[in-house]
Image (spheres, rainbow, N blue to C red):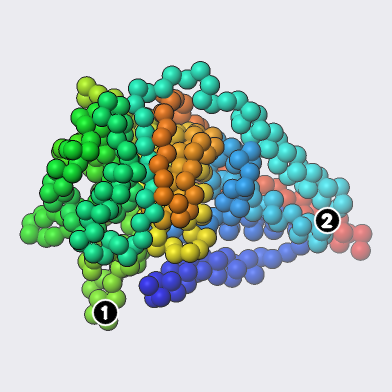
Amino acid sequence: MPFAVILVPAFLAIFYGIGTLILKKFVSKKISFILFFSLLLSILEFIRGNILSGFPWNLIAYSWSWSLEIIQVISIIGTYSLNLISLTIFSLPFILFVKTKYNKKYWFFSFLLILFAINYLYGFKVLSQPREKNIEEHDFVIKIISPNIDLKEFLKSENNDVIIKKLIELSNPQADQKTIFIWPEGMFPSIYLSEIKKYHKIFSEAFSNLHLIILGINNLEYQNNVESVYNSLAIVDNNLNLISSYKKNKLVPFGEFLPMEKYFQKIGLKKITHGYKSFSKGKQRNVININNKFYNIKLLPLICYEIIYPGKINIKKQNVDLIMNISEDGWFGNSIGPYQHFNKAIYRAIEEGNYIARSANNGISAFINPNGRILQKIKLNDAGTIVASLPKYKNKTIFSKYGNKIFAIIIILYILLIFYFKKVEKNEEKKLSFYK
C-alpha cells in the first residue's frame, strides 16, 4: 500500500513536470501565453487521463462541482473542454501583468467574464426546468443498497452468510413488487461467480421471480489452461441463475493489477485488493439488454473508478435506460477520496444525459438524474437503502454523441486564437520599436 501511495502520485506528477519545463521556455507577459498555458496543461491532463490505463482523477474542471449551473455545459462540450476553459478563467489574474494596450486587456478580460456569465445562465435555465415532470416511469422500482460493511469483514470466508443476510435485510424484498436490487462491488471476495449457487436457498427464500439482483463478485475462468480472475458485475435472478455479467476493463494500477507483475512479485509486492494474483482485464463494455416477460431495460455497467473517464464509458454510443455504478470505497479510508469519487458520477450523468444508480460500500450511494441532481443519497459511513422509480427518459446529449472530438475542436480554436494574439502582439512590438 505505501509503495502504491508513493509511486502513483509520482507518476502523475510527471505530466505537470513536463508542462512546467515547456512553459519555462515560452513564458511571457502576453495574452497569448495565458492561452498557451491553458492549452498545454489541458492537453497534458487529457494525456494523463488516457495514457496506459489512464487516471483522469481531480481534473481542474472538478473544482466547479459545487455549482450544477456552471457544469451543465459539459452535456455539450464535455469535462476535458471545460477543463481547458477553466484553466483560462483561473489564469485571469495574470492579465494584470500582461504588457499590452489597456483596451486589449479589458477586451480579453470582459470577453471571458461574459462567456462565464452566459454559461451560468444557460445552466440556470436547464436546471429551472423540472426533468422528472410528466415523464412516464418504468413499472419496476430500483433499490440501491449501501451496507457500510468494514473491509476487514470480507477477509473471513465464514462471514459470507452474515454479509448476505445484512444485504437481504437492507434490500427488504417485496414478493409482489418488480424490483432491481443493486448491491456494491466485491460483496463476495472469498468466492467466485461459479460458486455462488451454494447460497441458492438463502436467495430463493428471500427473493421472488419478479426480482433481479445486481452484485459485484470475482469471476474465475480458464482459457488454454491459463487462469484468469476478473472483477465482475453479475445480474442474477432469485434462484441465482445468471442473467448477464460484465468483466471490468479499466483496472486500478497497483489496486487491482500490478504493472510489471513478474518483477514486483519477486520482491514481495502484490496488488492492494483481496488476493495475490492481479485481476485480468475484460475486453469490452457492452450495454446489458434485459428483455423478458418482466423486464425490458438497457443497463450500462460500471465498476468502481470506471465512472471517472469522460467520453469513455459508452464508447459504442448505445441507447441506455440506466447507468449503474457499483463501488467499494473502503480503500480510501477516512479521506476525501469517497467524496471525490462520487463527484465524478455527477459529471458523467450530465455528460451522458442518463440516470445513474450508484451503490457504494463505505462510500456515497445515490440516485442521480441527467442534470446531475442528487435525487436521493446515502451519506458516507451510513448504511441504508434508496428506493427509486426510473423515468423512461432518453435524450442523448451532444457530448454523448460526439464525445471528446469536441475537445479536439476547441483545441483547434485555441491554437487559432494563440496565432491571432501572437500576430497582434508582434505588430505592437514593431510599433513600439518604431517610435523608439
Q: Position of residue 94 (x, y in %)?
A: 76, 59
Residue 233 visible to the viewer:
no
The amino acid at mark 1 is Gly
Q: Quadrant of residue 159?
A: bottom left
Can you say which quadrant of the picture contains the C terminus?
bottom right
Residue pictured at 42% horizontal, 39% vertical: 386
From the viewer's side, name the closer residue of 237 and 51: 237
The amino acid at mark 2 is Thr
Q: Which badge, 2 or 1, comes first in the chain's sequence?
A: 2
Residue 166 in the figure: left or right of residue 221: right
Residue 114, compared with residue 292, is above or below; it is below
Residue 389 in the figure: left or right of residue 155: right
Residue pictured at 49% horizontal, 49% vertical: 379
Q: Quadrant of residue 275?
A: bottom left
Residue 127 in the figure: left or right of residue 1: right
Residue pictured at 61% horizontal, 30% vertical: 126
Count residues near mark 2 (Cα–Cα under 10 Å), then give few for <14, some for 14-19, many for 20+: some
Q: Position of residue 244 (x, y in %)?
A: 21, 38
Can you say which quadrant of the picture contains the N terminus?
bottom left
Q: Residue furthest right?
A: 435
Residue 14, compared with residue 283, is above or below; it is below
Q: Residue furthest bottom?
A: 267
Q: Position of residue 335 (x, y in %)?
A: 50, 63
Residue beneath disc 2: 100
Residue beneath disc 1: 268
From the viewer's side, name the closer residue of 208 and 263: 208
Count residues near mark 1 (Cα–Cα under 10 Å), then give few for <14, some for 14-19, many for 20+: few
At numbered mark 1, what does the secondary structure look like: helix, strand or loop? loop
Residue pictured at 66% horizontal, 65% vertical: 26
From the viewer's side, name the closer residue of 179 and 371: 179
From the viewer's side, name the closer residue of 253 and 425: 253
Per the model, the C-alpha gap separating discs 2 and 1 is 59 Å
